[in-house]
Image (cartoon, rainbow, N blue to C red):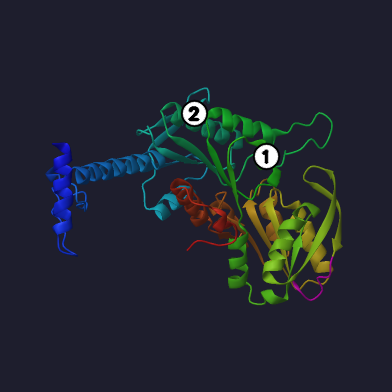
Amino acid sequence: MLIAFINKLKKESRNKMPGERMDVEEDKSNEDCVMPVRSANPIRAKSLIRDNLEKQASTLNSLHSRMPNIKVFSGTSHPDLAQRIVDRLGIDLGKVVTKKFSNLETCVEIGESVRGEDVYIVQSGSGEINDNLMELLIMINACKIASASRVTAVIPCFPYARQDKKDKSRAPISAKLVANMLSVAGADHIITMDLHASQIQGFFDIPVDNLYAEPAVLKWIKENIPEWKNSIIVSPDAGGAKRVTSIADRLNVEFALIHKERKKANEVASMVLVGDVKDKIAILVDDMADTCGTIVHAADRLVEAGATKVYAILTHGIFSGPAISRINNACFEAVVVTNTIPQDGHMRDCPKIQCIDVSMMFAEAVRRTHNGESVSYLFSNVPY
């Protein structure tokens, strides 16, 4: 009987006019979800419909497993930057309560469910660095043991980054220790900006995205220094030569560097200028400024060598100790920093300090990471 049925179907299909469709029995329960499948065999048509439904269901499941909902939490070090990031992303900041017990232990309470979520924790290495670092570690661990799908630490200014090598006997490599602590706490990914030394990325066994402030710096120079084509980019030490040459190449201007010798930490003994800055606008570029002894001495050296104006552009403006008074008394036209560290208080105390907002770069890095996209676009472009 089966053979007779098949022969009958073949005969009917041969008798159909060219271009005429055969009726297909549709699965009424799925008629709103799947388009009818053309087939001469009703049994085959149902099978194809069922396969399509299963394929769509598996695709949806894989998308949900690959892209959980996003949650962004802020530590106490830089809530303003975290708020700017979530405003850019169009989401609300996650609920978290941080407090200290009477013996100064840090306590963190995550105020909403993070089960299966893609979590981002924004905490910069500024202010009370040790307390903020401990707070970040506790927040990472709290989210991890609450079954978060992935925990990413967004650290605009990486703490202990200057202690990245054993430069004398019995010296610690504290940056490596911080990397180990973040990994053990449960961090799956790190997003940071302008590490003091790029090899710090190698201290981690997890992915590290080291963003650059360079695109934002280039944009600021072109918009705020009218005679930037007559400028020279200067590195205050030999270690920043690569950063300076990259900016000089993109602006198509010359570069110079200053060789410094230190007697001890935070004290500069002598400076030698390599390059010609006479009758040019000198732009000092460095990754961070702490007590500002280096850049103030460098500015004086540049003026002595004939520079008409001196600007300083720094990614991380730490400005500890006598830094503000030194800048106020120095010959800078402006000292430009990014907001990887809170700068409101510094800008009130020193009118020469100006701030570049880099929150859009971190927000775009978070969005691209969440969606599984490449972040290399941010290495040479400012997102708008």
220 sits left or right of 85 in the view: right
Q: Secondary structure at mark 2?
A: helix
Disc ID at residue 202: 1
Q: Is residue 276 magenta?
A: yes
Q: Secondary structure at mark 1?
A: helix
Taking the view exactly as shown, the residue that stands out farthest to the top is 103
Q: Residue at x 57, y 49 (%)?
A: 341
Amino acid tagged 2? Asn
Nearer to us in this view, 264 or 252 = 252
Q: Position of residue 353 (x, y in %)?
A: 61, 60
- Crowding around mark 2 (Cα neighbors within 10 Å: few <14, some 14 to 19, many 20+) is some
19 sits left or right of 252 in the view: left
Q: Position of residue 70 (x, y in %)?
A: 39, 43
Mark 2 against mark 1, which lies toward the viewer? 1
Q: Which residues are magenta?
A: 275-281
Which comes before the other along the chain, label 2 or label 1?
2
Reply above or below: 356 against 94. below
Q: Is residue 26 visible?
A: no
Q: Residue at x 39, y 44 (%)?
A: 93
Which quadrant would residue 113 be assigned to in this image? top left
Instruction: Give the labeled residue for mark 2.
Output: 141
Q: Is residue 266 visible?
A: yes
Reply above or below: 333 against 92. below
